Image: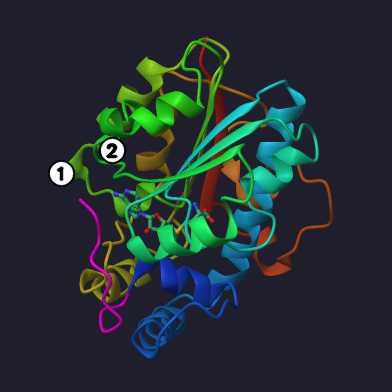
């Protein structure tokens, strides 16, 4: 299901853009984001860590020889998007960006689809087979060869009633051996008391945030051979530079991530 373009309803992609310091957001998004920030002021640091993790994970996979990337819930274009990171290793590598938000798609087509190696398509993670059977996706990616599927900061918008575990399994079962899944998910272990407030703000937004503890997130990696260092906080995953967010360094579980291989 595509999200309707609506400048008067808080939008998850535009709120994320606001946390990142972007300009593709409206007053209603900024007001909702500010409400969230009152409860969880460290969100912008977490999101910068999430983007840094994306870049490290994509580079790691490209260095392992992966040449096909499927980024579901790609978000509004920002700095160093997937295909730009991949191109540093192999300019011929292919990337597909998927989102269900029309504004994301317009911006992504304008800013990201800048080479034949990049495709932007509308798709809903809750219907993964529709994405993987999409004729344009199938023309762009070879499902007989390894693919890296990125599910970054999106599963926490999929409620249990939409069966996130089943969605992940459906994708996993369609991928060739040697494929990988990359996942990141907000964990509320450190701030369970803020969770209802944040869920409340997102209740009226384009996508509803689902608060989960790390014990509920770790099973999303079942069936995957998780590569070292395992399922960890964003800044702990193969850091290549000093940690961006010192206050988060001491926190046990705030935003979990991991990379799993399909054997
Ligand atoms: C928080 S942003 C994350 C962007 C990027 N993946 C990252 O980690 O930087 C979440 C994105 O997922 C998209 N999204 C939410 N629910 C979705 C769904 N069911 N299917 C496809 N995209 C979805 C939103 O439109 C938004 O662009």
- Mark number, residue 84: none
- Circles 1 and 2, Cβ within 8 Å, touching? The answer is no
Q: From mark 1 to mark 2, how far is it between C-alphas? A: 8 Å
Quickly name the residue at label 2. Answer: 164
* Helix, strand or loop under label 1: helix
With 223 as the anchor, is 8 left or right in this view?
left
Residue 81 visible, this orientation = yes
With 90 as the anchor, is 75 left or right in this view?
left
Question: Does residue 180 belong to the magenta stretch?
Answer: no
Q: Residues within 10 Å of mark 1 (few under 14, many from 20)?
A: few
Residue 212 visible, this orientation = no
Most common SS among magenta residues: loop
Q: Residue furthest front?
A: 116
Range covered by the magenta-colored residues = 1-10
- Residue at 63% x, 24% y is 227
Looking at the image, in which quadrant does ligand 1 appear? bottom left
Res 169 → quadrant = top left
- Residue at 19% x, 42% y is 162
Quickly name the residue at label 1. Answer: 161
């Amino acid at each position: 299901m595509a999200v309707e373009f609506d400048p008067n309803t808080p939008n998850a992609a535009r709120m994320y853009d606001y946390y990142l310091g972007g300009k593709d957001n409206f007053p209603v998004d900024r007001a909702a984001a500010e409400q969230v920030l009152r409860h969880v002021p460290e969100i912008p640091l977490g999101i910068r860590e999430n983007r840094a993790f994306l870049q490290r994970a994509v580079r790691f996979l490209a260095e392992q020889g992966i040449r096909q990337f499927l980024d579901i819930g790609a978000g509004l274009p920002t700095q160093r998007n997937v295909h730009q990171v991949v191109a540093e290793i192999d300019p011929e590598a292919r990337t597909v960006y998927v989102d269900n938000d029309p504004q994301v798609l317009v911006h992504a087509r304008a800013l990201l689809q800048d080479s034949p190696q990049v495709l932007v398509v509308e798709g809903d993670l809750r219907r993964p087979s529709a994405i993987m059977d999409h004729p344009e996706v199938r023309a762009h990616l070879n499902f007989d060869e390894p693919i890296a599927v990125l599910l970054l900061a999106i599963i926490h918008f999929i409620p249990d009633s939409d069966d996130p575990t089943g969605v992940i399994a459906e994708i996993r079962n369609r991928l060739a051996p040697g494929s990988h899944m990359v996942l990141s998910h907000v964990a509320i272990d450190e701030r369970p008391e803020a969770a209802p407030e944040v869920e409340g703000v997102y209740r009226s937004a384009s996508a509803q945030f689902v608060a989960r503890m790390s014990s509920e997130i770790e099973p999303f990696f079942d069936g995957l051979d998780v590569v070292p260092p395992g399922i960890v906080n964003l800044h702990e995953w193969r850091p290549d530079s000093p940690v961006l967010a010192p206050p988060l360094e001491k926190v046990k579980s705030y935003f979990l991530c991991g990379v799993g291989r399909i054997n």
